[in-house]
Image (cartoon, rainbow, N blue to C red):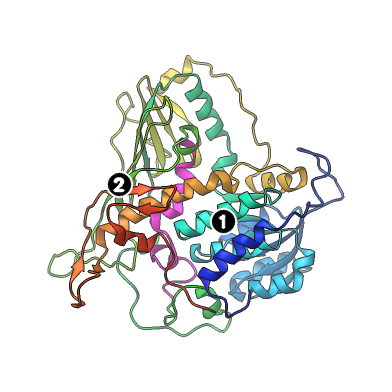
Amino acid sequence: MPKSTNRRKFLKTAATAAAGFTIVPRHVLGGRGYTAPSDKVNVAAIGAGGKGRGGIRAVESQNIVALCDVDDKLAADARKAYPKASYHRDYRRMLDERASDIDAVVISTPDHTHAITGLACMALGKHVYIEKPLAHSIEEVRALSEAARANPRLITQMGNQGASGEGIRKTQEIYEAGLLGDVHTVYAFTNRPVWPQGGGAPKGKTPVPDHFDWNLWLGPAAMRDHHEAYHPFAWRGFWDFGTGALGDMGCHILDTPFYILELGYPVSAEASVGQVFSRNWTPDYHPESCPPSSKIHINFPARGKKPPVELIWSDGGILPRRPEGMKVDDKLGDGNGNGFIMEGTRGTLVADVYGANPRLIPTNLMDNIVVPETLPRVTTSHGMDWINGIRGNYQPSSHFGKAGPLTETVLMGNLAVRGYTARFPKPTSDKPDNYIVPGRTRLEWDGEKMEVTNVPEMNYYVKNQKSRAF
């Protein structure tokens, strides 16, 4: 991508360009399940350290041909493990120099660069695996989904590993056996954030290490002074780069109920957030950073004969009430503050993070009920399911057609969180201190149009407004 291209123009042109590709990958010859032993996929990685290192390991049985990371120190282990792979700091140079050698790309960068890197790869006809959440803004998620729809030969996967697990399939079998009845309420919860969050942007600046390219790390985000508080981990707690606790864990925890109940786009969301107090014991909100905790009510309409569903999300260690019938020593979720509850007219189900270990409440019900296995299982890892999809020409467990609406719902929940503390200048006011403060407002949502209909100021956050050429 030329350096003069800004983010908005790139999103539009990349999605359009992707529609024009009709390349048949060389790994689709045998149909679903076919694996040519001598034919490995040539994989590149954008993000080689941290979470990216795990993403590469998941597919390291293939040919790792190129690595890209803005931090040479974090990338050192991957470079040592795959010495034949070329190394790059700038993903654009990697795509320029190695495009003909690359079949597929694993993207494990901070949230704010998922879309710009993913769309660039898809426009070149590359299969992509992007870590969760799929992108940083709803607009970007929609662009990735549309690019995938425009070129169905591209095999896509989001990195929410539970989508390939046993739990989601067992839960669906329990649900389809009628043991829950009509599910009307879902509680989902996480112990995240496990990084500093809610205190605002760091003050001052720190030196940029020699092994790190701060400009490339910022990517399309607005320029600012370097500070060690952002990289390599706590960026998740700042809206310019991350998506907070919900963005970090929502795609893991919500995937099972979202998919099984066919929730689709929500129609509204309302949030309340934990507060950081100043010395005079007044709430000290920092709109640039995600809050230390939140509770969000997201509402979905009826879908055919399925009733409306209320999804109640909580993070920061806030747990829902324990369902009736749970024993004192029964774990709520995984016992570490992560999981979900599905309440229906006939029964209640509790599961761990990633949808693992689904069980009916009371738990002894599972001792007397045999739920037949009716769904095929993924017999390999989430990453290798993507690789096998490339070889066999099928879309894997969390392809963008499935992952896109899920991620949009997660980010719509974040709109409600941001609306709790957002401050907007009144359009007709010439006084800079005259603000609209949504407060705890129920946001009405039109998913098809990607639009908050009752507080139009919030649509500022539907798109990733902080962009620059870099």
308 shown above or below 235: above
For this orientation, the residue located farthest to the front is: 428
| Mark 2 closeness class: few <14, some 14–19, many ≥20 residues within 10 Å | some
- Across and down, in percent, residue 84 comes to 79, 68
- Across and down, in percent, residue 312 comes to 33, 41
Residue corresponding to mark 1: 144
Tell me, yes or no, if residue 16 can be seen here. Answer: yes
Q: Please name whichever residue, 405 or 373, is drawn nearer the observer in this view of the structure.
A: 405
Figure quadrant of residue 32? top right
Q: Nearer the viewer, mark 1 or mark 2?
A: 1
* Label 1: which secondary element: helix
Q: Is residue 62 left or right of residue 15?
A: right
Is residue 82 on the magenta stretch?
no
Rendered residue at 77%/38% (across/down)? 33
- Label 1 is placed on what type of residue? Leu
Q: Magenta residues, as a range? A: 228-257
Label 1 vs 2, first from the N-terminus = 1
Residue corresponding to mark 2: 318
- Label 2 is placed on what type of residue? Ile
Rendered residue at 52%/80% (across/down)? 215
155 shown above or below 305: below
87 shown above or below 108: below
- Across and down, in percent, residue 152 comes to 67, 48
Q: Residue 205 carries which label?
A: none
Quarter in which the C terminus is drawn: bottom right
Q: How far apart are marks 1 and 2 (CA)?
A: 33 Å
- Across and down, in percent, residue 101 comes to 79, 65
